[in-house]
Amino acid sequence: MTLPRALLALGVAVAGTVTGTTQDAKQPATPGKVSFYKDVRPLFAQHCNGCHQPAKAQGGYVMTAFPDLFKAGERGKAGVVAGNADKSYLLELVRGHNGKAEMPKNRDPLAAPQVKLIADWIAQGATDDTPASAKEALIDMANPPKYAAPPVVTSLAFDPQGDFLAVAGFHEVLLYSGKDYKLSSRLVGISERINAVAFSPNGERLAVAGGAPGRFGEVQVWNHKRDDLVVSAPVTFDTVYGVSWSPDGKTVAFGCIDNTVRAIDTATGKQTLQMGTHTDWVLGTVFSQDGQHLVSVSRDMSLRLTEVPTQRFVDNVTSITPGGLRGGLMAVDRRPMKDKKMQKVPEDTPGVPPKVYDELIIGGADGTPRLYKMHREVKRQIGDDANKLREYEKMPGRISGLAFNADGKLFAAASSLDGKGEVRVYDTDTGKKVVCEGVSGPAYAVAWHPDGKSIASAGFDGTVWLHDPATGKLLKSFVVRPTAAAASR
């Protein structure tokens, strides 16, 4: 699970741009006049665009480009008829009857005032008042992003078979061959910021967490072998982070900057879990081996445990004593372990007693990797840190990427400080380390090839490095800067 700290500066820059364009839009308006840019467009972005974008045009209807709003979908009815709300099929679908509406699909109906805004906008002529300074170039699968410079890479993931390496880009995930590292395909969606990528346990799907700063968060689920967007789930009003899969592949969890941990059904996009005890941004998540528990790390300096079936907060896995951790946590991964069961469970353990023993590696602002037991084996004492198993040698700067190898005997970590970065491989049991050579800038993400013979890492300068984990030798590197010709297979 990854979050480069340097991206916070980028988020501020983007937020500044949005603020500036909003000011452009705040011109004196006719009383009662509904603004597409200020009133209607945000509703479409939050409730509609996920299922009606070029990558996932349900009903044959696209809502991400203004001219497409007036076109007909599969049913042959125009979505918007300027000046005539009653003949606009879009309005027919969002108007609720007895508390139910056909759209948004699998979600609560729009509130009556929201429906009225859309109806009034259509009746008033359905005009586009988006300021020229706020209009964006069309970006979709047919018009992929053009890069003036390599993107900051915030996340990497290999599929379980080692066929693909997923790389987070701008508005897209880039899929490279896991064998020769040539670009295979580009998965372009509506989220400009891509914060985390993760393949399903069987390697058949890819989950993506991202969004648009200050506007919306989104979780995408792709059938990457067909370039098919299966689910686009809008969530909250800002970008989301730290996506992870349940062991059965039916659920993905993620963190939000509203301090919540959430999860959705990977078939429908419907929310299945929300836990809100964190007090700052949630940046990483991972499930237990049996899928019954979920852990999350946050800028609030805590690693917290949630019982999945009940959505109930169970415990602070880390110490709750002030100073127990120095700085926020940014990354977490679960150690692959098989057939190890819990030996003892305290009588005061809330909820269903855990049966499976799990270990977790965490890291963050203080640069120190730490290994923890997921479940408490002794009764909690105020101020204890009983779940901590060991600490490892401190890395320079902040750790934003962590990943175990397939058998859990080794883990890799990526850090950054003052324009420099470092990637290390640690022996989980002994703490022995190997420092990887040739890392040319801040490193934010790391992933193991399933064969264990190489690790991939990347960060600020858009370079992907491939290292031998045994020696730290640089095996290969390439720069993420695709051309339009490589937009599809």
Image (cartoon, rainbow, N blue to C red):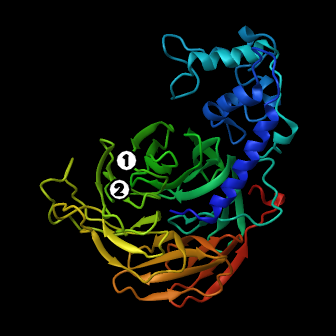
Q: What residue would you read off at disc 1?
A: 277
**Residue shown at 73%/49% (left/top)?**
16
Q: In the rendered view, tell whether residue 125 sits above or below residue 324.
A: above
- SS category of the residue bearing label 2: strand
**Residue 370 image offset from top left, x and y in percent:** 38, 73
Amino acid, disc 2: Arg
Q: Quadrant of residue 463?
A: bottom right
**Residue shown at 32%/69% (left/top)?**
372
Mark 1 surroundings within 10 Å by alpha-carbon count, few (fewer than 14), some (14 through 19), many (20 or more): few
Indicate left or right for 349 with 440 as reference.
Answer: left
- SS category of the residue bearing label 1: loop
Amino acid, disc 1: Thr
Q: Quadrant of residue 409?
A: bottom left
**Residue 92 image offset from top left, x and y in percent:** 65, 14
**Residue 222 image offset from top left, x and y in percent:** 59, 49
| Tags 1 and 2 touching, CB below 8 Å | yes
Q: In the rendered view, tell whether residue 399 sits above or below residue 214.
A: below
Q: Residue furthest left?
A: 347
Can residue 448 be seen in this snapshot?
no
Can residue 424 be seen in this snapshot?
yes
Task: Indicate which disc, 1 or 2, sits on the residue closer to the N terminus.
Answer: 1
Query: 107 or 221: which is nearer to us?
Result: 107
Q: What residue would you read off at disc 2?
A: 304
Mark 2 surroundings within 10 Å by alpha-carbon count, few (fewer than 14), some (14 through 19), many (20 or more): many
Q: In the rendered view, tell whether residue 208 sits above or below residue 454.
A: above
Alpha carbon of mark 1 to alpha carbon of mark 2: how far? 9 Å
Query: 274 or 156: which is nearer to us?
Result: 274
